[in-house]
Image (cartoon, rainbow, N blue to C red):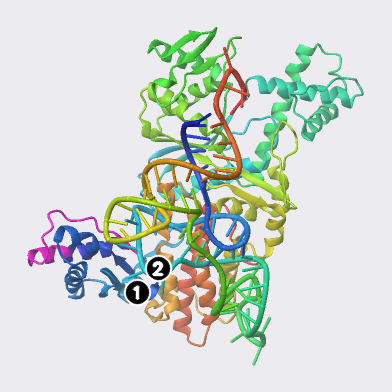
Amino acid sequence: MKETVKNQIAKALTQAKANGDLSYQEMPDIVIEEPKDEKLGDFATTLAMQLARSEKKNPKVIAETICGFLNDGADSIESAEVAGPGFINIKMSKDFFLSRLKEAILQGREFGQSDVGQKKKVLLEFVSANPTGPLHVGHGRGAAVGHALSCLMKKAGFDVSTEYYINDVGNQMNTLGRSTWIRYQELLKKKVEFPDDGYKGEYIKDIAQAVIDADGSSHLDKQSEDALTFFRQFSKDFILEGIRDDLKEFRVEFDRWFKESSLDDDDSVNKSINWLRDKGFVYEKDGATWVKTSQFKDDADRVIIKQGGERTYFCSDIAYHKNKVDRGYDLILDLWGADHHGYVPRMQSVLQAMNYDEEVFKVLLVQFVSLKRGGQKVSMSTRSGEFETLADVVAEVGVDATRFFFLMRSSDSHLDFDLDLAKKESQENPVYYIQYAHARICSVFRTAEEQKVPMTDLASADISLLNEAEEFALIKKILAYKACIEKSALSLEIHRIAFYLQELVSIFHSYYKQHRVVTENQELTRARLLLLDCLRNVIASGLGVLGVSAPEKM
RNA sequence: GCGCCUGUAGCUCAGCUGGAUAGAGCAGCGGACUUCUAAUCCGCAGGUCGUACGUUCGAGUCGUACCAGGCGUACCA
């Protein structure tokens, strides 16, 4: 939309220059914005103020000149006026909006689909929680943001794949196996000491009970080495299965589940270490193996193989990220919890050492969720075992409200998730406000059907009958949808969609209150129904991006 | 100490590349259902945009310093 205005202004500038009114050398950047107050016009530009210095003229004079050309028969522009210190306010013609609305209607549910992503191949990795316990609320935020982002970016024309990285190797797996084994023995009345560093959550007992249900006490006699192997495997599979279920319930799915252990199968961990070693980025010190990340963005070198010969988490992460880049993506996007932010420079450093384009790897940090219940903060450590699981919250608040709660905030601001409030508000939660609009529209259509309004070939309705100010406010907002998708996708800011939908729907609710859709006037009724049908598509599409349902009845 | 994020209405937060009188929801107060869903609408009230300098015709937005909160700063994952 703004492009049209931009072109008109560019034309006016060229005319002004040819006429000797302006003397700029290069065509300036023309920024089009929407005035806060609708009464001022549909679009505005501060161009005259920007030009004032180089032209050595009063901005008002420049604005007058440009407006002169704009008012002189420029296409689609009804009027252009100078205001304040030199703003140019532009009002577009009715036909301008109606013809664009027509296009949107013809696109149906596809409206909003963009190609700004240029089909770039994107790999989006998110959640990737360790399989040592159930997902908690913090993971839920990552899951909602990641999944919504993948939908959004697809809508914006990116070719997105999603991935969950499973850390199924290392010490934590031993701790998990040992914790379960001990709980198993306890449940079978054997006296054992529970270690301080074990996982203390109740879910460990559930896993132990599951083993008993399946195999009885047959593991009691095993050598500890064998028992550990069994319990490690069993617990991991059990937890992973739970994570998959929780995510599915939360409407989050992944294209691929990538196991850390698979990096050993094809020796890629050793290969990437050797690659770095050959290039001289690896050295030995104090019996450990280090990588020279400080040569790049990191403030210190990092250990990749510990004194005991064990690998660090970072070590396999290097191999994993090399693997990702080698798969040929234009963008590797990782969603990490904000507590991992110190990790970003070292990862960037390694990829840089490997000669990969800096632009290819991006990390989006998702800030913490603090969960409150009864005004009290709930602790969220897996180890202490006192945390609120995602599944519990979803069961209490519902998928739609939980997802929306996570998505309506900018992901780089801390989120207060007050359970009591979320539940209490469930009647007046913003998500219901949006869903209600969708249901309302569906209801209007049901009424229209009952009243026998002819609805076959609704697309042929004469939208030029739409004349109310509220209708045009609605049309303008509908038409802004595509730009909103593009902007949100490019800036990776999913919350913009949530805010857009609230604003959009608020205009509708207000319109609905003031004007009846189904009336005696059949042609006008059909025109309004067509407008609402278009609006319904946008709401459903936007909610779809957020992974929130669009109900036909409430 | 250093690094990252945050600081806007009583509460939770928007504010796009600097632009016109700083917005929304909740909470509070007052109105609107014989008419397509009142999970809605309309109105009122509520602000030294953490503080101080600076850049600019113009700063919530940019820069510097400081203050406050969160997180990180492992041969943990």
Q: Is residue A476 above or below residue A175?
A: below
Chain letter of the residue carrying label 2: A
Label drawn at residue A36: 2
Quadrant in which the C terminus of chain A appears: bottom right
Q: Position of residue A87 (x, y in %)?
A: 28, 68
Q: Is residue A230 above or below residue A486?
A: above
* Image quadrant assignment for residue A385: top right
Q: Amino acid at mark 1?
A: Leu
Q: Is residue A136 above or below residue A468?
A: above
Q: Is residue A118 above or below residue A93?
A: above
* Along the viewing direction, whichever of A154 and B7 lies nearer the viewer: B7
* Along the viewing direction, whichever of B75 and A190 lies nearer the viewer: B75
Q: Is residue A469 left or right of residue A134?
A: left
Residue A25 counted in the magenta span: yes
Q: Position of residue A364 (x, y in %)?
A: 48, 40
Report the residue that reaches farthest toward the right: A189
| Residue range corresponding to the magenta coloring | A13-33
* Image quadrant assignment for residue A305: top right
Q: Is residue A291 left or right of residue B73?
A: left
Q: Amino acid at mark 2?
A: Lys
Instruction: Identify the secondary structure beneath mark 1.
Output: helix
Q: Residues within 10 Å of mark 2 (few under 14, many from 20)?
A: few
* Along the viewing direction, whichever of A3 and B12 lies nearer the viewer: B12
Q: Are marks 2 and 1 in contact (CB under 8 Å)?
A: yes
Q: Residue at x 48, y 87 (%)?
A: A521
Give the residue at mark 1.
A40
